[in-house]
Image: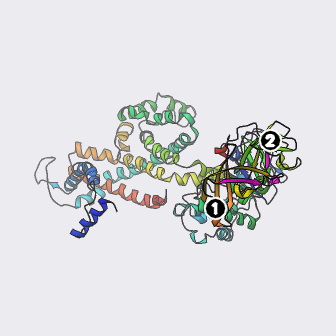
Amino acid sequence: MSVAAAIGDTMKDASGQEPPKKAGRFVPDMLMAPGMLWLAIFFVVPIASLFLTSLQTPVPGGQVGEFEQTFNFANYVNTLTDDTYYVPLIRSFVYSGIATLLALAIGYPLAYAIAFKSGKNRNLLLVMVIAPFFVSFILRTIAWRQILADEGFVVGILRSIGLVSETGGLYPSAFAVIMGLTYNFLPFMTLPIYASLERVDPRLIEASVDLYAHPFTGFRKVTFPLSMPGVVAGTLLTFIPAAGDYVNAALLGRPSNTMIGNRIEYTFLSVNDYPTAAVLSFILMACILAMVLVYVRRVGTEDLV
Amino acid sequence: MDDLTLQVPQGSFFALLGPSGCGKTTTLRMVSGLEAPTAGRIRIGDSDITYTKPYARPVNTVFQNYALFPHMDIYENVAFGLKRRGVKDTQKQVDDALELIQLSSVAKRKPTQLSGGQQQRVALARAIVNRPAVLLLDEPLGALDLKLRRQMQLELKRIQTEVGLTFIHVTHDQEEAMTMADTVAVMNNGIIEQMGPPTELYESPKYGVRGQLPRPVEPVPGQGRRGGWRGPHPRGPRRPVPDAHEPRRQGVSTTAGTRVLVGVRPEKIAITRFADAGEAPTHGNFVDGHVLSMSFLGVSTQYEVRTRGGDMINVFSQNLDVHNVLPPGTEVRLSWLPHHGFVLSGGEDIHAGMDQAS
């Protein structure tokens, strides 16, 4: 028996307790502390404050923007039944839903090609996926005005083949907003899918081919299911920010294309109706949370490796 | 890959034995269609499958890392091939396959919940259930520990006998190849060096074309002499070698003066105390030396003997009488029957390739 062990035993006998655990048991807590503190100050407190705001009522006889703290839950009912609010809310989910599907349709093949078919160019292609981030989000969105402008080549071609009437255009329109959303969030779709495809063992694909699966069937039965964690992450990373986005609708849409983000911004900053803006924020959050929960449960990511 | 012609009889257990990088896995991948040969044909029975797509070949593979589908349970893994071929009712066949590998109880589990040996058996069931014309096994036991490997070797052999499929097994483990296969092909640098049943391979191994000594074999250098050879003591009597027509002569010339190696398997050497050995036999193979080390292995005792010529020879001696073990330092005589020796060309470095051969 070693000396240390002998001492340990004596100590245990003497005090009836385990010897002190090795130093470092608080290290995980200490590592988490800065993050927790950050979240507490900059997330929990503002959320609570926003929630209180959403229950405020105007000060009787007060000026615009003067509210007092009440617990008026009727704010929620009033907002939800007002079509100037719920229509943009529904529109937001429709636009971001379409944009998410488009981004998936574009991003999945792109990620697949980078993961399996790119060879030496893999890193270059990945950099190209991220490259747009080097230009400001606003600038890139404004650039879509040029792309979809009436004088631009896209509209020109579509007019000449008759898909767009001679006087019609693409900007501003719902189409332009959805294009902008798709474009802006495409990297958030592509990268997680790439990450999960890249981890798929190519030998599993060989095994599926060996077991009589046509390459397409092999993709459907093996590669795609194994890439589901990436698809789930990608769709969430696209859908959630797209649903709350107001830049694309503001820069590429008409007033009839406003999304909930635009309504919140307008209500908060222009109308100074803080409680209604707060209510809208909470409704948006709740809707997204509910959709994400249903989606994740339906797709069932916990089964995947 | 070099020019390679292999004929595997239907229903046999065929092993491709060779060091890594010798082309055995490539051969397998060509048969399964995962790689295409630049020249030549691949036939199964009467049909030429050289350009058949891999998913259309009546061939299945047990992969080295098993390659089980991690998102499917064991049942789904085994049923995969059947379903792809449009078999409607997979239940019975999958159940039978799982029973064959004695894993019926884990059908609903995921591959990651199984041990390595169990995963290996599932990979086997997944291939066998399709009753392929040829089953390919790519070092299927490589990832298992020694004990499990032995167990699985016997298991594989049993299953092969039971289902009667043609197995082509790729391995670098000589013992594994010999335990299981009806025919072993020794492969090196893309060519087949020797092919035959395990006993033939063991009893008369070829001196590797590229200077690789078959193992385990104890080489005794000497000089050729008319009708025989001379051992390390030049004045000693002429010792006989196997008759010229025997395979173990392999056409090596023993004309006077040529350098030769006479090899003998370590278990075929008899070891006796020099004091008890008596007169040098006039007609027999022997060398004298002293015991350098002795390790008692249970069924046998392994001696390391340094001959008077300075060579090291390993001897496995059966433990018929435990009181008769020879301590290090004992002067001994090693002798073996002439027809147990094989003549190897002595011109090459006898230790070349020893490491890879293991």
Q: Quadrant of the N terminus of chain B?
A: top right
Q: Position of residue A129 (x, y in %)?
A: 46, 36
Which residue was labeled with disc 2? B40
Have a look at marks 2 and 1 and say if they share a chain. yes
Q: Quick one: SS at disc 2?
A: loop
Residue A303 seen by the camera: yes
The numbered mark, 2 or 1, whose residue comes first in the sequence reads 2
- Quick check: is B100 in the magenta stretch? no
What is the chain letter for disc 1? Answer: B
Mark 2: which amino acid? Gly
Q: Position of residue A110 (x, y in %)?
A: 53, 41
Left or right for A142, reference B18: left
Q: Position of residue A98 (x, y in %)?
A: 46, 48
Image: magenta residue range: B325-352
Q: Quadrant of residue A172?
A: top left
Q: Quick one: SS at disc 1?
A: loop
Residue lying at the far left of the rendered structure: A61
Q: How many callouts does the rendering have?
A: 2
Left or right for A84, reference B137: left
Q: Residue at x 50, y 33 (%)?
A: A124
Classed neighbour count for the residue bearing mark 1: other residues with Cα under 10 Å, few (<14), some (14–19), many (≥20): some
Which residue was labeled with disc 1? B325
Left or right for A123, reference B252: left
Classed neighbour count for the residue bearing mark 2: other residues with Cα under 10 Å, few (<14), some (14–19), many (≥20): few
Choose between B308 and B37: the one closer to the eye.
B308
